[in-house]
Amino acid sequence: MRRVPIVSTVIVIAAVLTMIGLGVWQLERLQWKQSLLAHYTAAMADKAEAPFPSANTQEIEAVLFRHSSVNCRFTSEWNSISGRNANDQAGYVHVVLCGIEGNRTAYVQAGWTQGPQHPDWKGGPVSGLIAPYIGGTARLIADPPAPGFEASAKPDPNDIPNNHLAYAVQWFFFAGVALVIYTLALRKRWRERA
């Protein structure tokens, strides 16, 4: 008589259902991400300016990839990071913390240079696109660039990772493999007992 071990079967079924649930969750995340990327693409096409957001995460999400402008009253904390220019050449983009109206601050990507040294820009009016930045903050990518800089590459919503379909397939595959391995283990056990 072929007996199925109850405890190990329950554990395997629970693991398989969990993996299937994670796969379904990734498919839901895929739909959410596709909707978000479509929203960002539409935001780039909207020429109406949005106010530069505060540090509130929801406020930032609502205006990403929209046009905006700030008056950079003073600059501090320059950060030069690798980046590309409008002609897709490698070099450095330069982000500076600006003091803006309302006693607030804003990160401004002033522009691109070939090397890590940046021109001595002291601030002024800046317009451009709002893009994500480190730590869940936002930055204004200057377009046109600040004086002395070349234009940075425009942000592209399609650069945001969207690998949820691959994750979903992976979880479904793991569930299938777990079932196959458990079935083979049961068959081996039954053969040994026979």
Image: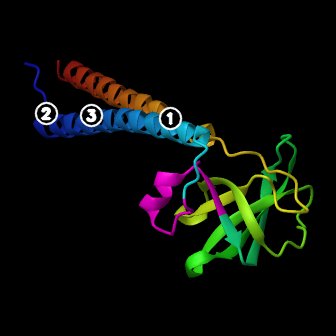
- Return the residue nearer the eye: 95 or 41: 41
Query: Earlier along the polypeptide chain: callout 1 or callout 3?
Result: 3
Q: Secondary structure at mark 1?
A: helix
Is residue 162 visible in the rendered image? The answer is no
CA–CA distance in space, label 2 to label 1:
50 Å
Q: The C terminus lies in which quarter of the figure?
A: top left
The residue where tag 2 is placed is 5
Image quadrant in which you'd find residue 156: top right
Name the residue that disc number 3 marks: 16
Q: Tell me what residue is drawn at x 82 percent, y 76 percent.
A: 122
Q: Is residue 57 magenta?
A: yes
Percent coordinates x, y for residue 40 in the rendering: 54, 42
State the residue in front, 136 or 161: 136
Q: Residues within 10 Å of mark 1 (few under 14, many from 20)?
A: few
Q: Nearer the viewer, mark 3 or mark 2?
A: 3
Q: Quadrant of the N terminus?
A: top left
Segment tinted magenta in the rendering: 51-69
The reply to whether the C-beta atoms of the residues labelled 1 and 3 are less than 8 Å apart is: no
> Picture quarter containing residue 69?
bottom right
Q: Nearer the viewer, mark 2 or mark 1?
A: 1
